[in-house]
Amino acid sequence: MKFLDQAKIYIRSGNGGGGSVSFRREKFIPNGGPDGGDGGKGGDVWITAMDGLNTLIDYRYQQHFKAQTGHHGQGRQMHGGKGEDIILKVPVGTQVLDEDKETVLLDMDRAGMTELLLRGGNGGWGNTRFKGPQNQAPTYANPGQEGQERWIWLRLKLIADIGLAGLPNAGKSTFLSAASAAKPKIADYPFTTLTPNLGMVDLSPSERFVIADIPGLIEGASEGAGLGTRFLGHVERSASLIHLIDGTQEDVVEAYRIIRGELDAYGEGLSDKTEILALNKIDALSPEEREEKAAALAEAAGRRPMLVSGVSGEGVTELLRAAWNEVRKTRGELSPFEQSDDDDGVETPGGWQP
């Protein structure tokens, strides 16, 4: 299934049904009079967040959604039925934006969350409603009210416990495939990952969390360069970040500063998230190179990075354990005593400025 994280759609609620103009005329029944029924209410437009969905691809092939018009009233004071509602099913984490693509109308951040987008028009009154001492035989009825319509944007921001950040070709997809059952595309060229990938990490039956592989960032991403800010939004909802640095490149410190600078420039609380720093691809480094680059990163970041290799699996479990501790902190499952014992090598950046 293709990944789609934004879509523009047109929605319209149903018109109300028209009231009926009718008169009761039956043999042997005097004083018949008006008996037109009311029209039914138009259908509403609802939106609900569904578990099990992780893409907006359904809204690529259908962009127009219209609720049903209410049924018209009939004689013998029979009122029309309500029009059928439209329910838009979206993944958890979907935001509803106005047509300007900036104003957030709704944030569907909980499974089962259901909200009304547009209300259907009221049904019109039948001529029975207008009878009175001075108008005993009204020959008119109200039409139904018009429904509402608008264009909206749907924008998905993945909800993951941990987000993977790093420059292109930092080994994020390889790490995700080693840490979970996800099978992202892996190749030896930059920008292999063009859409976010989600993986479920199973450390044990009771230790499970979701990790998201975000497409590689480059310098200037916060201003729209490369893949731009489109995928930075997926990191917003992550509790913590794993920052992977490609250990095979010459200047690991510059790689670290580029990503930190882009996260800080983007804002939205990304710079305040707990960061687990990891030097990746250590299988291709000699012991001397590992120590040299780890020391350089430690000096720049103020803490020593963890050493991992998505290819050989070295250090992967330890890194996932550190990530699991951060997830537990976010969920409120760790006591202060446990937190003090598990914080080695994991700090929230605050002293360094890009």
Image (cartoon, rainbow, N blue to C red):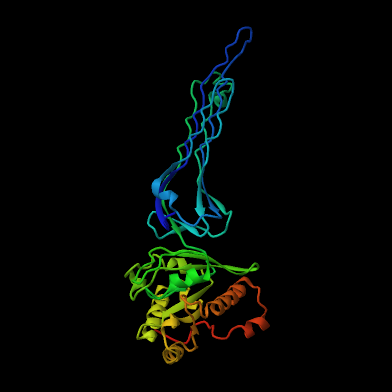
Can you name the residue that lies furthest to the top here?
28
Provide residue 24's location: percent of width, then percent of height: 58, 15
Q: Nearer the viewer, residue 316 or 10?
A: 316
Quadrant where the N terminus lies? bottom left
Q: Is residue 28 left or right of residue 301?
A: right
Seen at 49% across and 88% down, the residue is 304
The answer to whether residue 200 is above or below residue 33 is below
Seen at 54% across and 72% down, the residue is 239
Corner quadrant of residue 252: bottom left
Q: Nearer the viewer, residue 272 or 71?
A: 272
Q: Nearer the viewer, residue 49 or 226?
A: 226
Quadrant where the C terminus lies? bottom left
Seen at 40% across and 68% down, the residue is 186
Provide residue 270's location: percent of width, then percent of height: 46, 74
Query: How many numbered marks, from 0 up?
Result: 0
Q: Nearer the viewer, residue 174 or 224?
A: 174
The answer to whether residue 186 is above or below residue 99 is below
The answer to whether residue 86 is above or below residue 172 is above
Q: Is residue 74 left or right of residue 296?
A: right
Provide residue 170's location: percent of width, then percent of height: 40, 76
Residue 170 seen in the current view: yes
The answer to whether residue 127 is above or below residue 238 is above
Corner quadrant of residue 341: bottom right
Residue 236 seen in the current view: no
Provide residue 74's location: percent of width, then percent of height: 54, 23
